[in-house]
Image (cartoon, grey):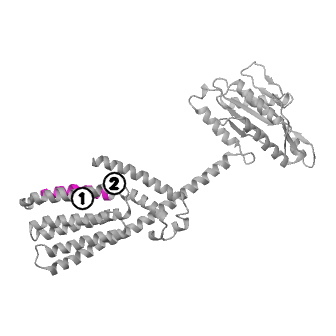
Amino acid sequence: MLKHTAEKHRNDSRRVYHDALSAATANSDILPDSELAAASSFGASSPELIEIYDRYYWAAHSLKPRSWLKWTFFFNLLLILFDTVLDPAVLVPSLVIRGIFGSSILFAIYMVWGQQRPRWVQGATLTAVAITVMLEAGAIGALGGFPLYERYLTGGLFTVATAILFFPIEFRWTIAGVLTAVTLHVALLVLGPTTEPAHALMVGVFYSSAMLTFATTRRAALRSQWNGFKSRIRELRDQAELARLYDELQLVANLDPLTGIQNRRSTQVHIDTIWNEGDNSQSEIAFLMIDIDDFKRLNDTYGHTAGDTCIKAVAVEIREVLRDSDIVSRYGGEEFLIVLTDTSPTHAAGVAERIRSAIESLRLAEPGSATATKVTVSIGLAIRQGDATAEALMRRADDALYEAKRNGKNRIEVAPPGAGSAVQAYSVKSSRAEKPRQVA
């Protein structure tokens, strides 16, 4: 049962830990970057941040008290044998006090730490441990008489001192546990089988100083853990910012700044990925090389601004026709490359014709004139045959584009599938009657 409970606790604490860190990292309103760098105290933080930190703190440190409680539980049962060796007459009282009373309370506290509780509940567990351990030591020690009685109480106090280091609770509850343990220690010494109350007080003062040292150590640990939490959030935010900047740089590196579509480098990476896939030979792939007709004349006549407008308009029309899985890039100045996957000759030719027709309907407004310039493109289409390489398919598409230019422009030429095949030409007439659209 303990093993199953511990495993569930570990899984829950990991989930809570990551959720709390994610919440604190993402929400800069409750934990501004300025506060991360400053030496701020936990008590001055917002309630929202305290709630997140409580979740983080429990998840990060709750295994410590559970581990302490588990081993103290078993050690407490082992002490029954120790008690009996020292005095066989205390066997039955030890079984009742340690085996039933003490072990039951320790197990109950162990279960309390199995999930996150209010801070006051977690804090009260140390006080409960102090009461249980000191009363247990006093009751069994009294049966053994002096000086065994004092040694039992000292052992109980030492046990509570170790708990101070393991219980991740607020400092005020640590002090409450210390005061409870020391008060019970002094009271039990005075009320027990001793004849020197002054000696009991002197011993109490000595052990109180030692216990306060443990408490001071615990306070320093709390401060260190709070600063560690802020450092962790600062580190995660820095990582998130670096990741964001990296993504932006990737966009800059992979996208054409004028059109917003992929650039030549990015497309080459995608093509390499497609060709390296193990089952890519089972799907048909087509390359479309597209070039804007008479672009140099348009650029020289109306200027680079008009040329840029034309390129952007053509890119928009191409993207409107393609599927999400298709790849389009600006391959050169006025040249575009399209990669169609899971296609067929009929589908690829249809895509090419829809692109050609859509662009043919564009009209580019002439600066200072009421007239508009017609925009057309020539397209070279190549379908992959067998295990042809990407470079070979690119050359065939480029050769087909050259044929389209040579044969009059504003047309589609399909590269022959093999040597000796005739070049197939598709009609330049649009397959849909559309009113020309003017681009300003």
SS at badge 1: helix
Q: Can residue 7 be seen in this view?
A: yes
The front one of 66 and 327 is 66
| Residue 311 badge | none
For this orientation, the residue located farthest to the top is: 420
From the image, tell me which residue sits under label 2: 114
Residue type indicated by callout 2: Gly
Q: Position of residue 403 (x, y in %)?
A: 81, 28
Residue type indicated by callout 1: Ile
The front one of 52 and 207 is 52
Instruction: Determine whether, in the image, residue 176 is placed left or right of residue 384.
Output: left
Instruction: Determine whether, in the image, residue 366 is placed left or right of residue 138.
Output: right
Q: Where is residue 370 in the image (x, y as percent from the top left)?
A: 93, 45
| Residue 105 badge | 1
What residue is drawn where x is 20% and y is 75%? 186
Instruction: Give yes or no for residue 13 being in the magenta stretch.
Output: no
How far apart are labels 2 and 1 at the CA level? 14 Å
Image quadrant where residue 90 sits: bottom left
Counting residues from the N terminus, which is met first, the one under dot 2 or under dot 1? 1
